[in-house]
Structures are given as C-alpha cells and as structure tokens.
Amino acid sequence: MKYKCLVLDHDDTVVNSTATIHYPCFIEFLGIYYPELVKNYTLESYFVKNFHPGVSSLFLDEIGMTEEEFVAEQKYWENYVKGHVPSAYEGIGDIIRDFRNTGGIIAVDSHSMTAYIERDFKQNSLPSPDVIYGWDIPKEKRKPAPDTLFDLMERYSLSPREVLVVDDLKPGYDMARAAGVDFAAAGWAYDVEEIRAFMKKNCDFYLESVSDLRALLFEA
C-alpha cells in the first residue's frame, strides 16, 4: 500500500454537509441579521468563498462582522448542526474500513467540531478515526497551518511520503503543501469550475468520485 496514513477532511469529503446543512444555516443566519446580503450568495458562490479565502474571512472581512458577532454566528451554527446530521458519501465507509484493515491509519482534519465529527461517523456507521483534529483545537494550529500533520507524523512515526491528505478546499491543499505530503482533491461533492480548475492544475491527484479514491489507495 502506497500510503500508511489517510487524512480526510470531513465536510464534503466524508459527508455531504455544505449543500444540506451549512449553506442553509448560513442563509438562515443572514436572513435574520443581514437580510440585505442574502441575495448575494448562491450555493455555488458559497462553495467558492469556502474554497478561498475561507469561511472566517468571509464573515470577518467580506461581511464585516466584529469578533463578537462572529462568535455569535458560530453559536448559531452549532445549534443548527445539533439538529441536522449529514449523510456519508456512498462507498466512503468501505474505503475507511478497508484501509484500516490493511494496517492504515485514519485521521480526520476538519473545521467542524470534534463532537459533530464523532457524531456523524457514528450515525453513518463509519469506523471511528484513529485521531481527529477539529475546530476546537487552538486557532493557530488549524489548517491551513501544517501543525496537525507534523503532530500526526511524529505521533505515528510517519514520513511525509507515507501520508495522503484528501480535501475539497484550498486550506487542506495549503496545509498538505506546507507539510510536504501528497494531496488529493475530493471532487465528488460539487462541480464548480473555479475550484475544479485550481485543483486539477495544482494537486497531486484530482478525484472525481469516491471510487477514484479507492483506485488511488488500493489499485495504484
């Protein structure tokens, strides 16, 4: 097996969550606190903003929230997510299970809270990850910072060539590049030209389907 450790993003990589949960929550929040801005954001444009510069910059820099308002938005999002469980992509659970059965290590590196990642894995009957780096780790260690990958490699005595990061967004790509590990773009959640063009040009692998991930891991 080429890789010993598979580092998965959560939203739109393991579970279909932006279109079904995060975007509706975002629009609902805007409708209450910034109703004049609702018309500015389609699902596609929201994907692009998440891709770059990221959701924090969207709220703080573009929308212009204060730090206090940003904290309030996060609480609103947490309350919304509590009542909505996303569905895992078909086949992703089998990949996780088969990778672990061959001795591989499964990590999740995500901007979702650890508790919700654990819940989503449990509710979708997915094998539990060996380690999770969620939104609740210190801000300076979250992706795109490479700290979590360095911690992972030290914890399991891994070299960069033994690690593969799979993510649908640029922060995951930036994190992988900063740590010197391979990166595969998860392209199965949506088809947005701006994101697809960047990923195909810059990433080590562009995966159009979950089955492409299986082929990369087990058939290469």
Image: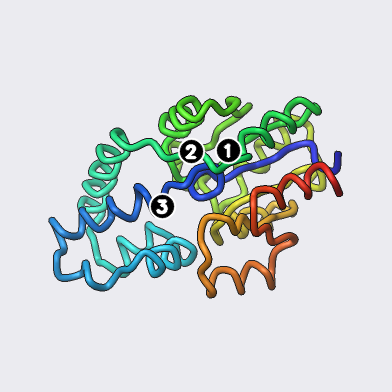
Residue 28 at x, y percent in the picture: 21, 54
Q: Residue furthest front?
A: 90
Determine which residue is flagged by label 3. Answer: 18
First reached walking from the N terminus: tag 3 or tag 1 = 3
Could you tell me which secondary element the residue under label 1 belongs to?
strand
- Amino acid at pointer 3: Thr
Query: In which quadrant is the N terminus drawn?
Result: top right
- Amino acid at pointer 1: Val
Determine which residue is flagged by label 1. Answer: 108
Residue drawn at 23 percent across, 72 percent down: 39
- For residue 134, which numbered disc appears in the image? 2
Residue 139 at x, y percent in the picture: 44, 45
Q: Nearer the viewer, mark 2 or mark 3?
A: 3
Look at the numbered discs 1 and 2 and tell me whether their residues touch, using CB distance below 8 Å: yes
- For residue 152, which numbered disc appears in the image? none
Residue drawn at 74 percent across, 53 percent down: 182
Q: Nearer the viewer, residue 147 or 56?
A: 56
